[in-house]
Structure formats: C-alpha cells, structure tokens
Image (spheres, rainbow, N blue to C red):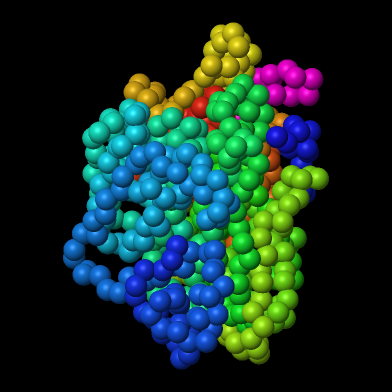
Amino acid sequence: MIAAGALRRRAHSNSTSRGSPSIEIAKGLRVSIDFNLSISRRRFVLAAAGVAAATVARPASSMASAVDERRIRVAPGQARFTGSSGPLTPVWAYDGTVPGPMLRLRQGEPARIIVENGLDEETTVHWHGIRLQNAMDGVPGLTQPPIKPGTSFVYEFTPPDAGTFWYHPHANSLVQLGRGLAGALIVEEAEPIAVDRDLLWLLQDWRLAADAQMAPGFGSAMDAAMSGRIGNIVTINGTVPIDQRVIAGERIRLRLANASLARIMALRFEGHRPVVVAIDGQPCDPHELEDGRVVLAPAMRIDVVIDMQGDPGKRYAVIDDYYDGLAYKLTTLAYDTASPLRTRPLDAPLGLPRNPLPEPDLAEAERQEIVLQGGMMGGGKLAGVGGMMGMATPGMNGGAAWAINGMSMTGDGHAGMAPRFTLKRGTTCHLTMRNETAWWHPMHIHGFSMSVLSRNGSPVPNRTWQDTVLLAPKDTIECAFVADNPGDWMLHCHVADHQMAGLMTVFRVT
Ligand code: C2O
Ligand code: CU
Ligand code: CU
C-alpha cells in the first residue's frame, strides 16, 4: 500500500481483432489492421510480436436500420493478470473476460444490450458518458430496478456521440468494479481520422494479495476517507503489460481509459509527443500537453494521436508518475527494426468531427454550486462532515466521510434519492464545483457532457467537454451544460470509495 503522505502531496502544478479486413481510408493508409486476414510484412511483424493492445477493428458492414443486439452475462470467473503462466485470480466478469468485451456501436444507430445477471447479488450496467434516455442509465433505485440474480435487463439506446466510453455496474460499485466488472464502449465516427492503427488501453488497478487473490478490505474506513482503494498492480486490457510493438513512422490513435477504482495516472511517453484529440469521448481542439503528461483520473478517457518518431529497434518507456516518489514504468514502446513506414509524419488532419452537443447559453444560465467537503486532514482528523449527518464513526461500515453542500448521500444508487436541485428542461446550468478537501476528486455527471469553462479562474483552452472532471485539492472548476435530457441524474466522485462514503448527489431535469 502507498503512504498517505505521498498520495496527498500535489503531484504536479496544479484481444484480438474480429474478422474484418482493414479499410483503406486514403491512399496507402489503412485503419484497423486485422492480424488474421492479410499478412503484409508490417502486420505480420505485429502479429508475431503479440501486441498487448486491443485493435479497434471496424465491423465489415452494418445494416442501417437493424438494431445492433448483444448479450452480456455477468458472472464470477477467473483472470490471469500476469500472463498465461501466471496464477489465477477469481474475478467477476462480463462474458468471462476482464475487461469485458469491447463493445463497438455506431453513432446514431440503435443498440440493444441484454444483460443477464449470473452473480449472487443485484447488479446494473451504467453506460458511462453516453447521453442516453434516463431509464437506460443503469442506476438502481433511481433509473431502474436492480437486476436480480438470475434475471436480465434489456438496455436500448442510440448513442448520439461518437467517441471512447465505457461500461460498469452501478450497484455495489466499489466491490463489483473492483472485482473486474468494466469494459470499453467505442462509438465509431462516421468518418474517422486517418491513422495506421486505432488502439485501446483499458487501464485497471488491482490490490492483490501475495497469492494473487483480490486483497480483502473493500470499503475500509481508511481508504474511504483518504485516497480510495489504490492497488499494487496496473493492467492494460487485463494483463500486466508486455512490450507494445510499434513501427517507426506509423501514426497511432490510442484510446486511454482509466477504469481503476481510485488510482489517478499521469502517463509520459518518453521520446514521443502525444496529441490529445478527445477527452471523455468528446473531440477537443487537437493539442500537445505542456508537460507531456496525460492525466487520467478514474473514469476518464483521453484519445491521443502519436506519431511513432522513435528509431527502429529502440525502446521507449511509458511512465506513470502521478504520485510523487511513486513513479513506475507502465510499459515500453518497442520499435521493430524495420525501416520507417514514412520519413515524415503523416500529413493528415487530427481534428475529429464534433458531436452534436447543445451549446450552453451562459447569459441565461442558472447557477448552481457544488461544494466538496470532508475526508481526512492532517493529524488524522476528519474534516467538514463531523456532525452533519450525526454519524458516529465516519467512513466506517458504510458511514459518511464526505459530503456535498453539507449532505452525505452514501452507498450506491438506491430508492428515495432526493434531488439536490432541479433544472427546467432546456436551461443552461452554469455549475461551479469547489473542492474544500485535501484530496483529489474526479467528479462525474451522468447523462450530460459539460463544457469546462475555467479552473481556478483561468479559462480552460481547447474547447474541452468532459463528463468526469478532476478537481485537485482546493480547486474550483466552472462548467456549463444544457439540461436537455429529463430525469434524475447522478453527480458523484468516481473514486468508488468516496462515492460510497458520501461524495454523491442527484439533480433533476423536468
Ligand atoms: Cu461511471 Cu456514476 O459512473
Ligand atoms: Cu456515468
Ligand atoms: Cu473523491
């Protein structure tokens, strides 16, 4: 486990592809290499090297009017996080794999996903970041009845936005997500940008005991009131990463998704300059990062485009150095010895087509403020929440350790969650989130994507829209969104322990 001091310090200023042939989208330029069907030299090299990244293949065809129907079974299973010869870890899994199957849907086309519950407890599936009908949002007691053991639930929605999303339970989330229930959901653009490969890294952090079993103690009071359950191994697409084989000169779209319970990551690609093209599924103005670090809080997704400008045969580390003094090498970009695919970077635009998000009208906006309170301060005292809800042992046994505007809504979705504020359909909400605590919180809004206006008074550049916004200790963030989607929606911290211990609220759009 990691010492609280190291965690509290501010860290910085502030599968295989399925069988469809790849598609040539420009002369000599293919997306989604299929390892099995055609063996050009480059594909052969990659296939032979056993690439750990999942390739985002495009489906061969789709009937415009047919509903895309899938079935997913939730059940106990086993995973080998350390590779095929490693020990087995009992997990809970979607369709037997951790992470669950990568779902690929098409923007604006209806999907039906039938979820069967093979667990001994209730579950739901939340389609994180998808702006869908409230009844499909997957919050037990609030938007749907929980899926009882042995029963199923049919989710039907039409994703309005293309981008990188994910899915996970919203019942007993800390344990269910923590035991492995998470998967990527990619909604494809009608016209993707030109890249040589489109890859996904679904990042997960696990706290394993020496015998490779999940360490017990989910929901400990210490995790709850401090950083959350941070683990001791990080996996990419379900395994401890091996080398990522790349070819000099190729352009890769890398979809990064942090499905960890609590670990925040800051990835540095040694010798490379990733260009951010989308955040939380929403395209932004393509930009390089000042310090080159891609910061991913739990639940966040960032799509970067990287031109592989390293030298053939060389190796470059990918480092996560978010927490002071706790940097580690996540993986290595290992260059094939083949001569570069091209001599200069591909000359093709990086801007993704924008999604149909309603533009906030700030002049007419309704202002709301969310203040984050509580958590452990120096000296082992719990700040802010004491006495608010009259709990005796904060953070213990499902008790509160955190609050929003003086109110602690604990546990997961349940019946009778009263909305904190109500917005009339169509109004713009200008939302200020103020972090009074000594900890970081990735605050997540259901059902909407928010235009991020400012951080501590400074405008946020690059036309950024997010569903999960990381607040550093004492940060104030201003955002805006149009309340165009009726229903009761959650707003909570995505550090699962924090949500369970009170950092959660609900608002209503009528
Ligand atoms: Cu990832 Cu309440 O959500
Ligand atoms: Cu969500
Ligand atoms: Cu939090």
Judge whether residue 375 is colored magenta.
yes
Image x and y of residue 374, in percent: 64, 24
Dividing the picture into quadrants, the one containing residue 220 is: top right
Q: Nearer the viewer, residue 220 or 160?
A: 220
Judge whether residue 330 is colored magenta.
no
The outermost residue toward the front is: 85
Q: Is residue 65 left or right of residue 109?
A: left
The reply to whether residue 350 is in sight is: no
Image x and y of residue 75, in percent: 35, 40
Dividing the picture into quadrants, the one containing residue 380 is: top right
Image x and y of residue 178, in percent: 51, 37
Indicate the quadrant containing the N terminus: top left, top right, bottom left or bottom right: top right
The reply to whether residue 132 is in sight is: yes
The outermost residue toward the left is: 65
> What segment is highlighted magenta in the picture?
372-384
Compared to residue 180, the image places residue 24 above or below, namely below
Q: Is residue 128 left or right of residue 326?
A: left
Dividing the picture into quadrants, the one containing residue 388 is: top right
Residue visible at 63% across and 45% down?
233
Indicate the quadrant containing the C terminus: top left, top right, bottom left or bottom right: top left
